[in-house]
């Protein structure tokens, strides 16, 4: 459980910090950012939900982070390369998580992804590489024996 706990925790903290920084410099409040995560469950009403909706957004964000860590850990039990070459595989996993989130999950919960500007896509992809995939893979390597 330690690989999943630490990978999920670092992923969750780093990813939400990156989101708060990226959107904060553009004038978006932390509450609004967290409410946008809750929108996946509450729909547009999340933006009228105040702090409870923001808290739900934070909880959902952490659930997603721990799920991503659990998936990587489970895959690493079958594919030892994920542990041996954790840095490279983690960066690649970040791209996979980005693609799944933006092209599968968001449309499924009714949040259209559309065609964002290139800078937005680049920032999101790099954030997922460095703040999602990499910390998960490094935690799995640190707390796992080779299968």
Image: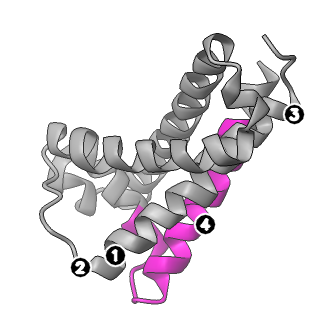
Whether residue 9 is visible: no
Residue 49: percent from left, percent from top: 30, 56
Of badges 4 and 2, the one in the foreground is: 2
User: In screen coordinates, is 29 left or right of 65?
Assistant: left
Q: CA distance from mark 4 to mark 2?
A: 21 Å
Secondary structure that dominates the magenta span: helix
Binning the other alpha carbons within 10 Å of mark 3 as few (below 14), some (14 to 19) or many (20 upward) gives some
Task: Report the front residue among 111 and 116.
Answer: 116
Point 33% across, 47% down: residue: 99
Q: Residue at x 62, y 40 (%)?
A: 89
At 61% from the left and 31% from the top, the residue drawn is 69
Q: Which residue is mark 2?
A: 117
Question: Start and end of the magenta stretch?
Answer: 7-33
Compared with residue 14, is residue 58 higher up or lower down, i.e. above or below?
above
Question: Observer-nearest residue: 10 or 82?
Answer: 82
> In terms of sequence position, does the residue under pointer 4 or pointer 2 come before the other?
4
On residue 17, the disc is 4
Q: Residue 31, which numbered label?
A: none
Q: Give the x, y percent position of residue 125.
A: 43, 62
Q: Which mark is residue 120?
A: 1
Q: If you read the primary sequence from the N terminus, does the residue marked by circle 3 or circle 2 appear first?
A: 2
Residue 10 is inside the magenta segment: yes
């Amino acid at each position: 459980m330690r690989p999943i706990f630490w990978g999920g925790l670092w992923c969750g903290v780093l990813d939400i910090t990156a989101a708060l920084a990226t959107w904060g410099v553009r004038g978006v409040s932390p509450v609004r950012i967290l409410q946008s995560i809750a929108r996946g469950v509450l729909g547009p009403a999340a933006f009228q939900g105040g702090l409870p909706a923001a808290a739900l957004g934070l909880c959902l964000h952490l659930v997603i982070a721990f799920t991503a860590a659990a998936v990587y850990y489970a895959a690493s039990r079958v594919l030892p390369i994920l542990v041996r070459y954790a840095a490279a595989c983690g960066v690649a996993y970040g791209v996979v998580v980005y693609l799944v989130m933006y092209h599968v999950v968001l449309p499924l919960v009714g949040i259209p992804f559309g065609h964002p500007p290139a800078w937005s896509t680049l920032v999101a992809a790099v954030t997922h590489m460095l703040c999602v995939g990499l910390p998960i893979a490094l935690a799995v390597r640190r707390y796992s024996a080779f299968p």
